[in-house]
């Protein structure tokens, strides 16, 4: 069989540290090319990983079977629609978009084109985390849960590579960390029927959700937590007792490798992955409702 050709959109820190090296090392795909908003950065990243830069996204789409995207959500969404319309399968980053209309447009474009989609929710593709989520979802009977995801990206003296991320500065933890939290809570407790949000210090947001079936959950998310307080945890309570999300230590590249595998399987079988663009759009709908609640 011909090795699927996958192109990468994006040249920022996430593309440099995860997407490009993971795609270049994956034995099941050919990293066919890279496009970035900076042609110089695209040329440098392509050279590092033994591929070629492309001058326009559409030229890259024409040369590929699938497209991976490592771009801000407002840039990702319209390019994902164009890639799907060009017949490319999509490996998307979270959030798919920060408006409901754009997120739905991505899912609708993929449905019309019949292309497979996977959204890279890191925890869902972590080895230990993914197994735990699947086990708890199968067990069922959870009536409440709480998540804390506190990051120090924008804390004083931060040296995070995402310190200069304009979209994270603008949208805050709700949109950067909120998708991770929902990617765990929704498969365990069910879809959210309602959500309310309350502001805390800086960009910290407290979420309360009521889930279909009556379960309830809460979450605290922040990109501005003091470094000693940075942590993440999800704990669920139910008929089977209490259990917490394990803290995986493998890093994001192995998780991304599994996301690539998931996209290849969805493309080959035609069966949607649970973390497809439609699920990504649902996450955007919930976060948009939370943002509206803050107003």
Image: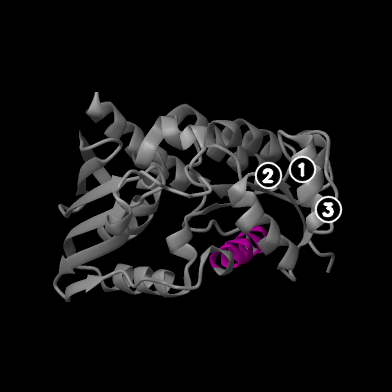
Quadrant containing the C terminus is top left
259 to the left or right of 222:
right
Where residue 230 sits: x, y (%)? 32, 56
Toward the front, the furthest residue is: 157
> Mark 2 — residue?
11
Residue 189 located within the stretch drawn in magenta: no
Q: Which mark is residue 47?
A: 3
The kind of secondary structure the magenta stretch mainly shows is helix
Q: Earlier in the sequence, mark 3 or mark 1?
A: 1
Which residues lie in the magenta part? 255-268
* Residue shown at the point (45%, 40%) measured from the top left: 281
Q: Residue at x 22, y 39 (%)?
A: 194
**SS for callout 3:** helix
Name of the residue lying farthest toward the top:
295
Q: Which residue position holds label 1?
A: 42
Q: Is 170 located above or below residue 227 in the figure?
A: above
Q: Is residue 61 visible to us here? A: no
Q: Indicate which disc, 1 or 2, sits on the residue closer to the N terminus.
A: 2
Magenta span contains residue 264: yes
Residue neighbourhood size for the residue with mark 2, other residues' Cα within 10 Å, grouped as few (<14), some (14–19), many (≥20) = many
């Amino acid at each position: 069989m011909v090795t699927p050709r996958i192109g990468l959109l994006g040249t920022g820190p996430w593309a440099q540290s995860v997407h490009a090296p993971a795609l270049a090392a994956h034995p099941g795909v050919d990293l066919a090319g890279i496009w970035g908003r900076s042609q110089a950065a695209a040329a440098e990243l392509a050279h590092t990983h033994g591929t070629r830069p492309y001058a326009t996204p559409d030229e890259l789409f024409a040369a590929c079977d699938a497209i991976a995207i490592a771009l801000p959500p407002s840039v990702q969404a319209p390019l994902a629609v164009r890639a799907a319309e060009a017949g490319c399968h999509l490996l998307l980053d979270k959030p798919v978009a920060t408006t409901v209309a754009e997120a739905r447009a991505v899912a609708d474009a993929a449905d019309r084109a019949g292309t497979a989609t996977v959204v890279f929710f890191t925890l869902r593709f972590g080895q230990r985390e993914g197994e735990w989520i699947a086990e708890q979802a199968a067990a069922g009977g959870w009536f409440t849960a709480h998540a804390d995801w506190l990051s120090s990206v924008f804390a004083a003296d931060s040296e995070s590579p995402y310190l200069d991320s304009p979209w994270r500065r603008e949208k805050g933890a709700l949109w950067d960390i909120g998708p991770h939290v929902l990617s765990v809570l929704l498969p365990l407790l069910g879809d959210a029927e309602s959500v309310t949000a309350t502001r805390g210090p800086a960009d910290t947001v407290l979420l309360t959700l009521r889930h279909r079936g009556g379960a309830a959950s809460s979450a605290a998310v922040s990109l501005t937590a003091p470094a000693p307080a940075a942590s993440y945890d999800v704990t669920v309570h139910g008929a089977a007792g209490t259990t917490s999300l394990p803290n995986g230590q493998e890093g994001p590249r192995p998780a991304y490798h599994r996301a690539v595998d998931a996209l290849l399987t969805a493309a080959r079988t035609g069966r949607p992955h649970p973390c497809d663009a439609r699920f990504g759009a649902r996450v955007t709908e919930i976060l948009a409702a939370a943002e509206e609640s803050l107003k």
